[in-house]
Amino acid sequence: MSDLVKLTISEARKALKNKEISAVELTEAFLKQMESKRKLNAFVLETPEIALEQAKTSDKKYQNGTDGALEGIPLGIKDLFCTKGIRTTACSHILDGFVPPYESTVTQKLLDAGITVLGKLNMDEFAMGGSNETSYYGPVINPWKANNSDADFVAGGSSGGSAAAVAAHMCMAATGTDTGGSIRQPSAFCGVTGIKPTYGRCSRYGIIAFASSLDQAGPIAQNVEDCARLLTVMSGYDAKDSTSSQKDVPDFTQFLNQDIRGLKVGIPAEYRPDGLNAEIAACWDKGIEILKARGAEIIDISLPHTKYALAVYYILAPAEASSNLARYDGLRFGLRVPGEHLDNMYINTRSEGFGKEVKRRVMIGTYVLSAGYYDAYYLKAQKVRRLIRNDFLEAFKKCDVILTPTAPTDAFAIGDKSMAENPINMWLNDVFTVSVNLAGLPGMNIPAALSARGLPLGLQLIGRSFDEATIFKAASALEKDICFVRK
Amino acid sequence: MAEFIIETPKGKWEIICGLEIHCQIISKSKIYSGASTEFGADANEHVSFVDAGMPGMLPTLNKYCVHQAVKTGIGLKAKINKYSNFARKNYFYADLPQGYQITQYKYPIVGEGKVIIDLPDGSAREIGIERMHIEQDAGKSIHDIDPKKSFIDLNRAGVGLMEIVTKPDFRAPEEAGAFLKKLRSILRYLGTCDGNMDEGSMRCDVNVSVRPLGSNELRTRCEMKNVNSIKFVMQAIENEARRHVEVYESGGEIVQETRQFNPATGQTKAMRKKEFAHDYRYFPEPDLAPLVLTDEYINQVKSEIPELPDEKKERFVTKLGLTPYDAIVICENKENADFFEKAAAGHDAKKVANWFMGDFFAMLNEKKIELKDSPVSPENLGALVELVTQNVINGKTAKDVFEIMAETGDAPEKIVEEKGLRQVTDTGAIEAVIDQVLEANADNVAAYRGGKQTLFGWFVGQVMKASKGKANPAMVNELLKKKLG
């Protein structure tokens, strides 16, 4: 095997099973790649010793035929997942040196299936951001470059480290989390495939909370099939998370390579506003044509409350975050900046420990929950959230799956001025993705095209609640004909 | 109704008072985690990652705590809400690891109910329950170990609480006292809270305002938090009410505030505004699903409710013939009531009640032991009363027998037989003793017959003494009268 790091999970499994390669060899190849691509800043912690130890165990399991579904597959783990004995910081200064004494349910399931952990992946601080620039450890550099340019582009966020590492073949796949688009948007920017499943599909136990009613874990991988393999392992009911679903988890790989004739694909009018980037519109049209050519039925649908989604999201997510982040007080773990009295210690610790974007959201969240403002902001937003969900329920009476662009633009430059000066511009990146979280639905990014300047563009498939199956069916078809050439 | 009017030269005032009581739920594990609730462990022994507010940890609702809350709601004759949900109450404090308390806010598990209180004058009153919700307790801050440092013990963090809120129905301090006693009694009957205020498993916040007698207005109230005994609650109400009256009568205004009750002085003092001026930013807890209960579940819990003090008291009065006062006293505590009922089975319940509340409890007090350690079993207490009823022994002998029972734990029948205490009811035998006594005291017989009737009691005493207490006193009376003429 010449280029081990370019193997997909399916290919690697086959090679490992046939003893063409060993898990240790595979892991070593990735460790080497991680080293050579270190300047991308995708990993905030590398765990080579752990990975090699796990790979050795995997090789034994292949020897005695007890290999798990992902035996010896080298993964990167987003730093939002608590990993037992491995530093976990949510890329925040306030969690300096925090080593969890417990494992998140999702990573435990992956470990049980045999993965090797290469390290912890960079992300926006507490998953708040759309460019990975809010990380305490600095931005991730997108492996893609624009034509004839050396400029560094953002990897997107918040799972920027995950998307970039997969794109740069620093890990075979990665875990991500998605609260408003944090799996799908960086996947689009880095030309990889990622799915946020239905809310409740994956346990949130051990994932550092940002906005509890929106957070979901999901995989980022090189293709649809790998995502299906990973999601099958990551999903399932967990008694430790009261919001996790007891619904059965199918083997998602069974929905690949199917005939999609008659599949009803909804195209929401509200996602094509005047002034939609022409490249994005063209990419979307290309996706529509491909599905149509394969026999899908294209249906015009309306999601009338789309225009409120961003506002609702930027009330509800900060509200929950302001409460979820109250526990970072310097008392029991992470950073402590002493103060004369308890209050001063809180103020000193949180002032130094949290970055600008996190502070902004804590302030917004505290404000919208305050006495006298609750009804006007939080309560109103909850009601509109219901209307947004109802829009989707209505639409899904007419169609089986919805196709939209994933992000309104391709990746932007690191340090982009308009984003830095006005956070609203940054938040607009989430315009196509947040509704899906608000409605609790599954959504997937499929790399679809390159922009004129040579950066990846993605398409999003949105499914019914707990119907990831149809997304995989459509995604598999789309992926075949879209012929996206990976990095 | 307990009359309590504050009268001054300027006018008459009435108290308006409501209580909020935090009751620790009896359960093996905490309300949102699996950690133990055991009392008395070393600091921070019983702390799970959830209780410590570790990153990524999630609460899960303890079903047993829900069961206990529903049981309590039924015991409070309250509406059980089939839909309730959880909310976060946000505030920063060192012993609140998550930075919020998971409680219930808009939709509590229990709605309106009522508790009947029994007042010392024999009257009864109904006190309304506004609501009851379940929530988690905070940990403990310890400030007196080190002059510069505070220490935190999280053993209590996450222990389940039921917060019972009454309507502002109290018009007198002793009504609040009677309510707390009754509430404690109900909770103990149900086994949902041990009600020990001195250990903090029942804690009381007191809300007080006053108004001119006869008016219907509701004036500004003040709250006193964590008053930790029934006596202090009553003191706090009275003293706070008197303070309000003084302020109003000197032309001042009461400001709504939280005050601290000082048990040493009995007075209340305003807390610094900073200590209570929180904006709790309540919002629905996204980590827990709403709590939905079915009729089937509620009925199941209903079927597990034991007979409660009011019903038991009623039965003791109507079926066993006790006076309401005796019944109330005996029923306040379930162990007492159970013991009594066992003792009274098949015997004269009223007499058993007298023995139980009299000599029996005097014996326990003297020995400083608890009911469960009593050397006298309920069966033996009943048997003793039966021996008196059946005229086998007389009342005085019974007291002697009881003393031996308290020492040896023996059955009264055995003691009576072994010591030959069976009372003499044979007319001939008693007459013989009387003759002996009269013969030996000819001078007193003459004095009696000469008109000194008060000597009759002395003769009775002499006869009883001569019979070693075994003669039936009624027969002695009757035969003596005959013989003395």
Image (tube, coloured by chain):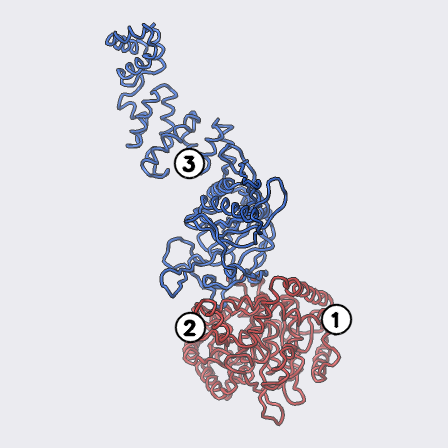
Q: Quadrant of residue A62?
A: bottom left
Q: Is residue A196 above or below residue B32?
A: below
Residue that sits furthest to the bottom in the current view = A148
Residue to which mark 2 is pinned: A85
Chain displayed in red = A
The image shows residue A151 at horizontal and vertical percentages of 59, 91
Does mark 2 fall on the same chain as mark 3?
no
Residue to which mark 1 is pinned: A301
Residue to which mark 3 is pinned: B336
Q: CA distance from mark 2 to mark 1?
A: 49 Å
| Left or right of B40, for residue B252 | right
Q: Residue at x 43, y 49 (%)?
A: B265
Estimate how packed mark 1 is, as few (under 14), some (14 to 19) or many (20 or more) residues with alpha carbons within 10 Å: many
Q: Colour of chain B?
A: blue
Residue type indicated by callout 2: Gly
Q: Chain of mark 2?
A: A
Per the image, label 1 sits on a secondary structure element best described as: strand
Q: Is residue B398 above or below residue B19?
A: above
Q: CA distance from mark 3 to mark 2?
A: 55 Å
